[in-house]
């Protein structure tokens, strides 16, 4: 476990550019009750805390082509002492929806093999939960050159949106980037799709129709974003709401990996990242996309380092409808080692920020892309409790990265949902986390392996998980767990 501190000067600079004010007293965590209540404005996938008669989860999509080694699943986790019921609808490309009902036993998880029920290049899922609460995530698997299988985990969401944005795309060196557009509703959706590259911005698809209860897949190379090292995307509906995800397969010499995750449902003026690293064998880059009509100034801030480490970073000017990149290792005086990052702009100056992080082991790169985490828009809320249906299926070190945004020391406890209910993981009870501190947490205790996990902190935190890329495969794939609504 490593523990780092953020310098006071960096906090001051961050607040000056509109980043969530830290230094307030820590917020006491609220015991979560997992249910459904959408945020007023689009946020990030989250586990709502208010109990309602039913909860609808939307999963962005997994491969279901039936090819050898390619598979996808939807996992429903039930932390309650009672059984829950779920109605699952699988949506595919040019295929009829497939529906099934199932139950999830108390204190357990149920996995749905999507490819066994529907055949489609990608299939998304709608999971309607009644009679209890639960959280839903998806897992996608496909073979990669030199890797038996590559695994991608992503949370599902309780909110669709009329707009979606991606900042980091890559179609160079034989890499494949596909958009997965899912319409779970009984009316068709109509969208305009644009993208920005180093050559400028274009909007090649206008009035594009996604039929009711269906999935459309768009290969970015086929709409003129071919051999591009930087591709940002906007999908804006003129009618209806939908889900937009990106499937990315890296095939180049410097990038290798696979991932599927939701796009951002809105641009924001703050984006936080718990994990980042500068050092040998690590390539870290951030893409900042401005989908608006006016240029925006964005200030990056280095977080989670020792108190005597302050690295001034010049603001970045992002032109309208363009994407710019930022590489921490290029900043003079940037220290080696792990860090967190935040990107802030003036209120109302909205952007989208994603991180691509490649760590190389034995000359084999593992690339992972993570969208930043914004505070909740209407009130600046940052969670003290995070949960995940999918965590470590085998013992793994440095599996969680936790950053403390508050100016007070905190303690973090990891809990697991076992056969008898929620219990503390013995080796992960009251782990110290300094003010503005960054720590990594091992999931090697057998009580934490193969179970739904809940991370509780006495302060506000951002939590990233780093799960193994696949069985017998080196490298990790980053993703956010689900913050619990407060």
Image (cartoon, rainbow, N blue to C red):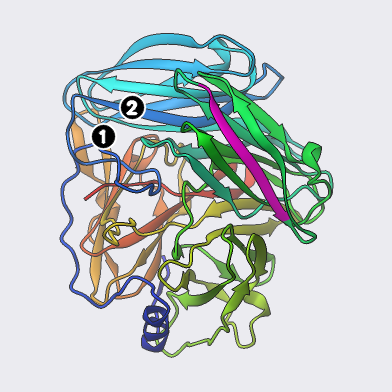
Q: Are marks 1 and 2 in contact (CB under 8 Å)?
A: yes
- Residue 380, position as x, y percentages in the image: 29, 62
- Residue 372, position as x, y percentages in the image: 49, 57
Label at residue 479: none
- Residue 231 appears anywhere in the view: no
Q: Is residue 359 left or right of residue 101?
A: right
Residue 131 sits in quarter: top left
**Which stretch is magenta?**
188-196
Relative to 324, residue 78 above or below: above
Q: Is residue 264 left or right of residue 410?
A: right
Label at residue 36: 1
- What residue is at 61 percent from the left and 51 percent from the top? 368
Q: Quadrant of the N terminus?
A: bottom left
- Residue 338, position as x, y percentages in the image: 52, 70
- Alpha carbon of mark 1 to alpha carbon of mark 2: how far? 7 Å
Of helix, strand and loop, which mostly describes the magenta segment?
strand
186 or 72: which is nearer to us? 186
Disc 2 secondary structure class: strand
Q: Which residue is mark 2?
A: 56
- What residue is at 42 percent from the left and 37 percent from the top? 390
> In this figure, what is the number of numbered marks?
2
């Amino acid at each position: 476990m490593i523990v780092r501190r953020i310098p006071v000067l960096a906090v001051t600079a961050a607040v000056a550019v509109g980043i969530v004010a830290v230094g307030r007293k820590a917020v006491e965590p609220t015991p979560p009750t997992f249910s459904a209540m959408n945020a007023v404005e689009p946020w990030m996938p989250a586990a709502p805390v208010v109990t309602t008669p039913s909860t609808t989860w939307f999963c962005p999509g997994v491969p279901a082509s039936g090819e050898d080694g390619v598979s996808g699943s939807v996992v429903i986790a039930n932390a309650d002492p009672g059984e829950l019921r779920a109605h699952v609808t699988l949506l595919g490309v040019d295929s009829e929806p497939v529906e099934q009902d199932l139950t999830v036993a108390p204190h357990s998880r149920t996995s749905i093999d999507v490819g066994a029920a529907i055949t489609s290049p990608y299939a998304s899922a709608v999971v309607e939960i009644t009679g209890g609460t639960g959280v839903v995530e998806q897992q996608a698997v496909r073979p990669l050159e030199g890797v038996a299988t590559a695994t991608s985990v992503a949370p599902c969401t309780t909110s669709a949106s009329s707009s979606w944005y991606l900042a980091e795309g890559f179609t160079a060196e034989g890499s494949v980037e596909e958009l997965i557009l899912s319409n779970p509703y009984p009316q068709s959706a109509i969208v305009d799709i644009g993208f920005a590259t180093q050559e400028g911005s274009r909007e090649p698809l206008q009035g594009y129709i996604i039929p009711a209860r269906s999935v459309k897949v768009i290969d970015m190379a086929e709409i003129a974003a071919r051999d591009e090292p930087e591709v940002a995307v906007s999908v804006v509906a003129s009618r209806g709401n939908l889900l937009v995800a990106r499937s990315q397969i890296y095939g180049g010499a410097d990038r290798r990996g696979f991932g599927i995750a939701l796009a951002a449902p809105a641009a924001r003026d703050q984006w936080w990242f718990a994990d980042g690293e500068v050092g040998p064998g690590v390539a870290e880059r951030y893409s900042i996309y401005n989908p608006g009509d006016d240029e925006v100034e964005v200030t990056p801030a280095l977080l989670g380092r020792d108190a005597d480490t302050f690295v001034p970073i010049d603001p970045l000017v992002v032109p309208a409808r363009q994407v710019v990149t930022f590489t921490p290792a290029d900043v003079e005086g940037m220290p080696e080692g792990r860090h967190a990052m935040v990107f802030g702009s003036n209120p109302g100056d909205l952007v989208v920020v994603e991180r691509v992080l490649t760590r190389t082991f034995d000359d084999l790169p593992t690339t992972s892309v993570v969208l930043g985490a914004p505070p909740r828009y209407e009130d600046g809320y940052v969670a003290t409790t995070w949960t995940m249906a999918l965590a470590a299926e085998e013992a793994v070190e440095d599996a969680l990265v936790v950053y403390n945004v508050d100016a007070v020391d905190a303690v973090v406890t990891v809990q697991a949902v076992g056969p008898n209910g929620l219990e503390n993981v013995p080796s992960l009870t009251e782990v110290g986390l300094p003010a503005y501190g960054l720590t990594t947490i091992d999931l090697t205790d057998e009580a934490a392996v193969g179970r739904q996990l809940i991370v509780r902190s006495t302060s506000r935190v951002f939590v990233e998980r780093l799960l193994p890329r696949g069985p017998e495969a080196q490298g990790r794939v980053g993703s956010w767990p689900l913050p619990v609504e407060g």
